[in-house]
């Protein structure tokens, strides 16, 4: 495998308070394209269509983790980032333990086999998989235990699915549609169809950390919208958890599990349905003539927001309030610990956006060594770096 890396760094913040980031690119001369990229601590793990799994701990150091003679269509990482589920081109699933990557563990063959979305339970015990034939508008749902037990068929979806949800322990799986949510008990295969009160439109759904399914729906109004969030109780019915009318705007994150609420007199608030608290957002990041795209990191600590056709996005750190402006990701991203993300450009190039470069010369050289092979003597650097208005 041939590797060529390059780094672009900038200092910050600028006079507007925006913190730029560093762009590090790793170009790989490999067989096949990159079909999955995942963060693991500060490292990046990538999977190619040719069955090669490699890891980049610090950007320029790339090592092959595993190389399997298989065609890989997609991959998904478990919540603990230790395991990868690899989907073969025939739709079958295999699990790789990144700590002991000597062999793949097959998850059994379901009755229906085709490529389609799949997701881990938070405890790593189960992978839910949709087999979606090209000539059909419906998919076949199965759950695959990771302990070696055979997969269990759940049935056929009610239509073309969007978001596949799995509870923390893997005991329930759900799919949200505009008019209802279908929920299955994975032990028995029993399906329940849940509807929002008064036929309201379903906006989002997520499993709460307690294991309960939450469903958000909206009721449009003249100049304002109303939000209703229900929680499914032990009796299988939806109980009202939250109501809020008079919303100026009501937005949904791209993963379908988070909401952004804007009231006429208060701040914009982010609510991840899996949690019980709101996070204030800087409203200027949401402004624009069109409904913005909002992508939230799985751990809820970062998000990026942009107008649909914008070439740049605003990256927000929700813990520190730090704000950066960077080019729009080329596709799905792997969120990295410590800030930033990794995306794939031109099919075989990893582009990593990290934290802003330190502003002192000595700290900058230490920072540079962790991201590139370039070495600069201290005397070659300015003792003080000036601010800049430019964006990356």
Image (cartoon, rainbow, N blue to C red):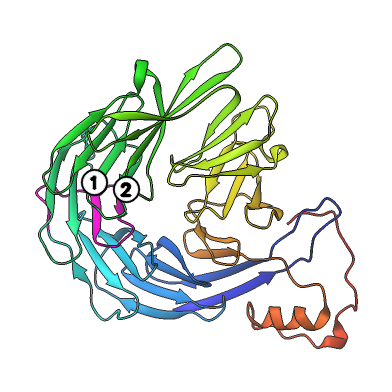
The correct choice, above or below, for 268 with respect to 299 in the image is above
Magenta residues (range): 109-129
Q: Main secondary structure of the magenta part?
A: loop
- Front-lying residue, 160 or 230: 230
Give me the C-alpha separation between circle 1 and circle 2: 9 Å
Q: Is residue 109 left or right of residue 321?
A: left
Q: Quadrant of residue 70?
A: bottom left
Identity of the residue drawn at 86% across and 58% down: 388
Identity of the residue drawn at 21% across and 54% down: 91
Q: Are marks 1 and 2 in contact (CB under 8 Å)?
A: yes
| Labels 1 and 2: the sequence-earlier one | 1
What mark, if any, has residue 279 been given in the picture? none
Residue 116 colored magenta? yes
The correct choice, above or below, for 49 with respect to 390 in the image is below
Q: Is residue 82 left or right of residue 60?
A: left
Q: Which residue is mark 2?
A: 211
Does residue 96 appear anywhere in the picture?
yes
- SS at mark 2 in the image: loop
Identity of the residue drawn at 26% across and 29% down: 237
The number of numbered discs placed on residues in the rendered structure image is 2
Does residue 158 appear anywhere in the picture?
no
Q: Position of residue 338 (x, y in %)?
A: 59, 67
- SS at mark 1 in the image: strand
Q: Which residue is mark 1?
A: 172
Q: Is residue 112 left or right of residue 20?
A: left
Q: Position of residue 145 (x, y in %)?
A: 18, 59
Q: Position of residue 181 (x, y in %)?
A: 29, 31
């Amino acid at each position: 495998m041939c590797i060529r890396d390059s780094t672009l760094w900038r200092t910050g913040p600028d006079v507007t308070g925006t913190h730029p980031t560093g762009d590090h690119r790793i170009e790989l001369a490999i067989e096949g394209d990159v079909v999955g990229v995942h963060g693991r601590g500060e490292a990046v793990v990538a999977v190619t269509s040719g069955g090669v799994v490699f890891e980049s701990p610090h950007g320029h150091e790339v090592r092959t983790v595993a190389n399997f003679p298989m065609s890989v269509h997609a991959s998904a990482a478990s919540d603990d980032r230790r395991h990868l589920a690899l989907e073969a081109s025939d739709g079958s699933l295999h699990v790789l333990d990144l700590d002991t990557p000597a062999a793949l563990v097959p998850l059994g063959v379901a009755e229906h086999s085709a490529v389609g979305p799949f997701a881990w339970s938070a405890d790593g015990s189960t992978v839910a998989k949709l087999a979606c034939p090209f000539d059909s508008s419906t998919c076949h749902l199965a759950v695959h235990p990771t302990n070696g037990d055979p997969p269990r068929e759940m049935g056929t979806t009610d239509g073309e699915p969007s978001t596949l949800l799995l509870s923390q322990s893997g005991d329930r799986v759900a799919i949200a549609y505009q008019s209802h949510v279908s929920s299955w008990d994975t032990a028995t295969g029993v399906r329940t169809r849940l509807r929002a009160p008064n036929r309201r439109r379903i906006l989002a759904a997520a499993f709460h950390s307690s294991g309960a399914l939450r469903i958000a729906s909206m009721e449009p109004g003249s100049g304002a919208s109303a939000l209703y969030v229900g929680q499914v109780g032990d009796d299988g019915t939806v109980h009202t958890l939250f109501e809020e009318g008079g919303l100026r705007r009501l937005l949904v994150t791209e993963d379908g599990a988070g909401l952004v609420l804007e009231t006429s007199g208060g701040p914009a608030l982010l609510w991840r349905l899996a949690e019980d608290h709101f996070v204030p957002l800087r409203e200027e990041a949401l402004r624009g003539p069109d409904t913005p795209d909002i992508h939230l990191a799985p751990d809820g600590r970062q998000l990026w927001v942009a107008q649909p056709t914008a070439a740049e996005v605003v990256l927000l750190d929700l813990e520190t309030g730090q704000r950066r402006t960077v080019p729009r990701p080329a596709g799905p991203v792997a969120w990295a610990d410590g800030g930033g993300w990794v995306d794939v450009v031109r099919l075989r190039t990893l582009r990593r956006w990290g934290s802003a470069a330190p502003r002192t010369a000595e700290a900058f050289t230490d920072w540079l060594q962790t991201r590139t092979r370039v070495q600069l003597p201290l005397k070659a650097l300015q003792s003080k770096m000036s601010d800049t208005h430019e964006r990356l």
